[in-house]
Amino acid sequence: MKKHNFSAGPCILPQSVLQQASDAIKNFDDLNLSLIEISHRSKNFVAVMDEAIALVKELLSVPTGYSVLFLQGGASLEFLMVPFNLMKEGGKSAYLETGAWAKKARKESEQFGETLVVGSSANKNFNFIPKGYDVPAEADYFHFTSNNTIFGTQIKNFELAKNSFNVCDMSSDIFSRKINVADFDLIYAGAQKNMGPAGTTLVIVKDEVLGHTGRHIPTMLDYRTHIKKESMFNTPPVFPIYVSMLTLRWLKENGGVTWVEGINQQKADLLYNEIDRNPLFEGTAAVEDRSNMNATFVLTDESKKEAFDALWKAAGVNGLNGHRDVGGYRASMYNALPLESVQVLVDAMQQLENN
């Protein structure tokens, strides 16, 4: 039976990418050696790194003056690296608190200096995106999270700081829609949503914002170290970078970010229309802030839970259970999830209504 994978992450990847990655594990570049057993400094893997970086720049139209890095440690390490590299000694930072990951990022900043929360939706269990906030001019940087996997919200229009560096965690919607990289001073994203397997982290940083904090930064945590060494300061996570390269190649071949943004909108519209139409379901996020990546919803009649769970499981749907902080269901519709899979879920929802 075909599986329809709505897992929140690690998540679905294109089937063609999985096949190519599988082949490379056995025999990479016709070397009769595995990708994971050759030197990361060999010309074969350097070519992978070069292509991955080039694809990021092409697909996102990264301007000159920005560096693209593939690092390790996930977004969680970036929570630490951002204040290390951008908050001045005795400085301040500003955070928009829109979910669990934004809170964790803010807590890391508090270890470095005064950290201001300019807006928060915690009082409503993070079911909306705060708007109309002011970022103090004295903040060295302003940090925000573009999409919230747990609570199913997404920033649709970025309210950027005018006098501070703008830093965005795009872990769960990178490459899902068009963005203007020039609006941001630093973007980071864990790979395990729209890029590849867990294990590498994409960083896009404006070179001129670095080196002004006046603080000592440990070598491994200094972005300039990795820029100078072209993401090869230490052994990079070769397999996640290779699979990310394949996924970005797949995205380019199919029409790029513009193409996938249109498909993602179709998927989101299909599911949210059913949630709003069907009296047995109710969305948990504010309508204007609903995420195109992660749709969160609950049953209006909990006595139907056993029947609904049986229906979607029988249809081959996987990974639909909601996060414990929200409950109900969460359908994650990342780039590689086909429209067909969303239709299968909608059919199960309609079956429940008609039974």
Image: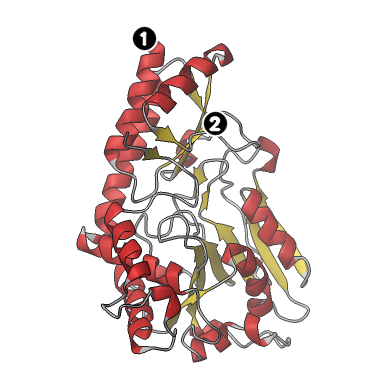
Task: Tell me the quarter of the image containing the N terminus.
Answer: top left
Residue 162 shows in the view: no
Q: Residue at x 39, y 75 (%)?
A: 35
Q: Residue at x 35, y 74 (%)?
A: 52
Q: Quadrant of residue 91?
A: bottom right
The residue closer to the viewer here, 33 or 198, is 33
Residue 239's spot in the image, x, y percent? 43, 70
Q: CA distance from mark 1 to mark 2?
A: 23 Å
Against 35, residue 263 (above or below) is above
The residue closer to the viewer here, 141 or 198, is 198
| Mark 1 vs mark 2: in front | 1
Q: Residue at x 70, y 85 (%)?
A: 218
Element assignment for label 1:
helix
Against 299, residue 217 (above or below) is below
Residue 284's tag is 2
The residue closer to the viewer here, 24 or 176, is 24
Residue 277's tag is none
What colour scheme does the image use? Answer: secondary structure
Determine which residue is flagged by label 1: 354
Q: Are marks 1 and 2 in contact (CB under 8 Å)?
A: no
Residue 79's spot in the image, x, y percent? 64, 66
Q: Amino acid at mark 2?
A: Thr
Residue 150's spot in the image, x, y percent? 57, 43
Q: Amino acid at mark 1?
A: Asn
Residue 294's spot in the image, x, y percent? 47, 42
Against 295, residue 232 (above or below) is below
Against 18, residue 305 (above or below) is above
